[in-house]
Every structure is written in structure tokens, then in C-alpha cells.
């Protein structure tokens, strides 16, 4: 069961948004595996690893955080993912 779920609307192609997510996660030292439709990721943090999955439908990048450190709020992870997708 997801510990935190959210969606990020995007413009452009699904290939572009997946490439942005992959680049940002790998730059942060994480692992990214997936396609234009769905996939998984994990990112290390000082408090522990954040793991999740994503799915793309229409112009929406939906994220389910499946595992996260207890001390890291889901809203902080969501904020960081949104930054990754906007700036990557």
C-alpha cells in the first residue's frame, strides 16, 4: 500500500517527462527503471531510502511512494519530486 500518492501534470511528451525523472533521480544517486507508461525508483536520503513507483496517463505523472523513512514526511518527498520534474 502506498504511503503517499500524488500526481504532477505535465506538458510535452511522456518520453520527455520520464527522461527528466530518470536524470534527476540518477543525479541524486538513485535508481530508476521503467518506460513511458510505468516504472519504479529509489533514492537515498540521509534518513534512509525512498522507494516508489510511477505511472503516466494522459498528461499526468502519478507517483506512489511505497517506502520512506519514518521521519521524512510525504509532503517533503512530493515537493522534491515536483522540483525534479520542473527543473531537470
Image (tube, grey):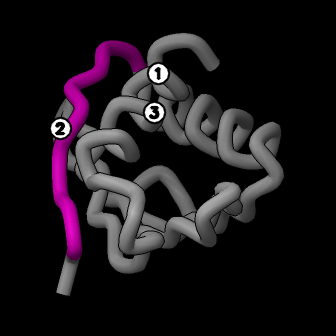
Q: Secondary structure at mark 3?
A: helix
Task: Classify residue 84 as left or right of residue 7.
Answer: right
Residue 59 sits in quarter: top left
Rendered view: 11 above or below 44: above
- Badge 2: few (under 14), some or many (20 or more) residues near its Cα, within 10 Å? few
Q: CA distance from mark 1 to mark 2?
A: 20 Å
Q: Are marks 1 and 3 in contact (CB under 8 Å)?
A: yes
Q: Position of residue 33 (x, y in %)?
A: 64, 67
Q: Residue at x 74, y 58 (%)?
A: 30
Q: Residue at x 41, y 78 (%)?
A: 67
81 inside magenta stretch = no
Camera-side mark, 2 or 3: 3
Locate residue 32, reporting x and y percent.
67, 61
Image: magenta residue range: 3-12
Real-space Cα separation, disc 2 to disc 3, in angstroms: 22 Å
Q: Which mark is residue 83?
A: 1
Instruction: Please identify, in this view, whether the residue under mark 1 or under mark 2 is nearer the observer.
Output: 1
- The answer to whether residue 41 is left or right of residue 37 is right
Q: CA distance from mark 1 to mark 3?
A: 5 Å
Q: Residues within 10 Å of mark 3 (few under 14, many from 20)?
A: few
Q: Does dot 2 land on a helix, a strand or a loop?
A: loop
Q: x and y percent of residue 60 in the render?
A: 21, 37
Task: Give the residue pinned by disc 2.
Answer: 58
User: Label 1 neighbourhood size at 10 Å, few (<14), some (14-19), many (20+)?
Assistant: few
Amino acid at each position: 500500500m502506498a504511503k503517499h500518492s500524488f500526481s504532477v501534470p505535465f506538458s510535452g511528451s511522456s518520453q520527455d517527462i520520464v527522461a527528466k525523472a530518470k536524470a534527476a533521480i540518477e543525479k541524486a544517486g538513485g535508481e530508476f527503471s521503467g518506460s513511458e507508461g510505468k516504472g519504479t525508483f529509489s533514492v537515498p536520503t540521509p534518513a534512509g531510502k525512498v522507494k516508489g513507483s510511477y505511472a503516466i496517463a494522459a498528461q499526468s505523472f502519478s507517483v506512489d511512494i511505497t517506502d520512506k523513512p519514518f521521519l521524512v514526511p510525504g509532503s517533503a518527498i512530493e515537493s522534491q519530486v515536483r522540483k525534479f520534474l520542473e527543473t531537470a
